[in-house]
Amino acid sequence: MREQKAAALKYESGEYAPRILARGIGTTAETLRRIAGENGVPIVESPNLADSLSHLNPFDYVPEKYWIAVAEILKFVYETRGNDELHQS
């Protein structure tokens, strides 16, 4: 069985790229998921992306090679929340 990994992301308009807010493996990943769930933060399952992002440091920008995958997740989250901020000028 694959060890659980998680990464919390944040993107603000005008930023170069999304940033890693937190990341973890094992019990730390489980804690991140629990805190997200308790606070209404959407959780998107993407084991391969979580594996890659879990090796970055908090506040690092997400590397360009992951931008498309992260953009798809952010789009899904914004649409799910009914928030269209990503499409505003």
Image: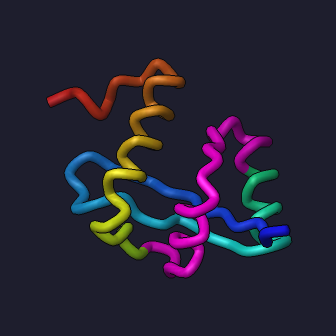
User: Residue 8's image quarter?
Assistant: bottom right
Judged from this view, the residue extending furthest toward the left is: 89
Q: How many marks?
A: 0
Up-down relation of residue 30 to residue 11 (above or below): below
**Residue 51 in the image, given as x and y percentages of width and height:** 60, 70
| 83 lies left or right of 63 | right
Q: Residue at x 76, y 42 (%)?
A: 37
Query: 85 or 29: which is nearer to us?
Result: 29
- The structure's colour scheme is rainbow
Point 81% across, 73% down: residue: 26
* Residue at far top of view: 82
Residue 14 shown in magenta:
no
The magenta stretch spans which residues? 36-59
Q: Position of residue 76 (x, y in %)?
A: 47, 32
**Identity of the residue drawn at 40% across and 52% down:** 69
Assign the C terminus to one quadrant of the image: top left
Residue drawn where x is 69% and y is 35% of the image: 40
Residue 55 covered by magenta stretch? yes
**Quadrant where the N terminus is found in the figure:** bottom right
- Left/right placement of residue 62 relative to residue 56 reads left
Q: Is residue 51 left or right of residue 34?
A: left
Q: Is residue 86 left or right of residue 39?
A: left
Up the image or down, 72 lies above or below 28; here it is above
Q: Is residue 5 above or below residue 41?
A: below
The answer to which of 21 and 45 lies nearer the viewer is 45
- Observer-nearest of 12 and 18: 18
